[in-house]
Amino acid sequence: MNKKPFILGVCAANSGSGKTFVIERLIPALNKKGLSVSVIKHAHHSFDIDIPGKDSFKIREAGAKQTLIFNSARSALITENEKNNFNLDNAIEQINQPTDIILIEGLKTMKIPKIEIYREQISNKRLYKEDPNIIGVISDIDIKHEIPSFSFIDFDKISEFIIKLIRK
C-alpha cells in the first residue's frame, strides 16, 4: 500500500489487558485485506530468546555485538544494546522487509497513533481521556465517548478502521 509503513501502537494502562490477543487477531484480518504486517513488541523486563548451550548463545556470551541466526525459512538478529541507547526509531529501522503497517505493542507514552485496549475488570484508568494520540479503543464495555470504539470481536471493523487511517 504505502512505501513507508504506517506506525500504529496497541497500548493499555495495565498488563494483561489483551494487547497480544488483539494483535494476534488483527494480523490475519489485515492480511486478508491485502496488507502486510510487522510487529514490534516492547518488553519492560529483561528477556532472552536465545537458548543457553546453543552455539548462537555461546557466540553472544563470548562478546559478539550482534548474532544473526538464519535458515531458508526464518532469521533472527540478536543485538546487545547499550543501556538506554535503543529506542522506537532504532526498532523500526530493524524492520527490513516491505510492510504496510508496523504494530507497536506497548510503549503507551509514545507520541504515535495508538489504539487502546481497555478491559473494565483489569483497569480503572482510561488512557484515551488523557492521550490525544489514542485514536480508537477496543473494549469489553460500551465506550460512550467521541473516540471510535470496538468490541473484542469486531476485527473486521477494526481492520477497516485501520485501512482508512493508512489511506489518509
Image: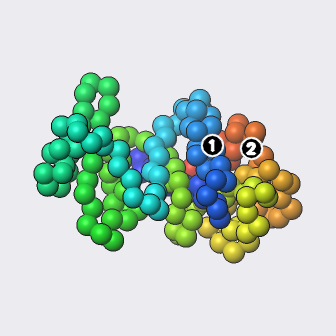
Q: Is residue 77 left or right of residue 102?
A: left
Q: Secondary structure at mark 1?
A: helix
Q: Position of residue 155 (x, y in %)?
A: 70, 39
Specify whether residue 2 is in view. no
Outermost residue, bottom side: 130
Q: Nearer the viewer, mark 1 or mark 2?
A: 1
SS at mark 2?
Answer: loop
Q: Is residue 79 among the parts visible in the rendering?
A: yes
Residue 109: quarter of image: bottom right
Residue sticking out furthest to the front: 53
Q: Residue at x 25, y 66 (%)?
A: 82
Q: What is the crowding at mark 2: few (fewer than 14 residues within 10 Å), some, or many (at least 20)?
A: some
Residue at 18% across, 51% down:
61
Q: Are marks 1 and 2 in contact (CB under 8 Å)?
A: yes
Where residue 151 appears, as percent x and y from the top left, is 78, 46
Question: Would residue 1 be found to the left or right of residue 55 on screen?
Answer: right
The residue drawn where x is 14% and y is 55% is 63
Question: Foreground: 54 or 43?
Answer: 54
Three-letter amino acid code at the position of disc 1: Phe
Total count of labels: 2
Q: Could you tell me the amino acid type at mark 2?
A: Phe
Above or below — where is 159 with respect to 8?
A: above
- Say the numbered circle drawn on residue 21: 1
Which quarter of the rendered picture does the C terminus lie within? bottom right
Horizontal and vertical percent for residue 140? 80, 50
Protein image colouring: rainbow
Residue 157 bears which disc, if any?
A: none
Query: Which numbered disc flags the more N-terminal residue, 1 or 2?
Result: 1
Q: What residue would you read off at disc 2? A: 152
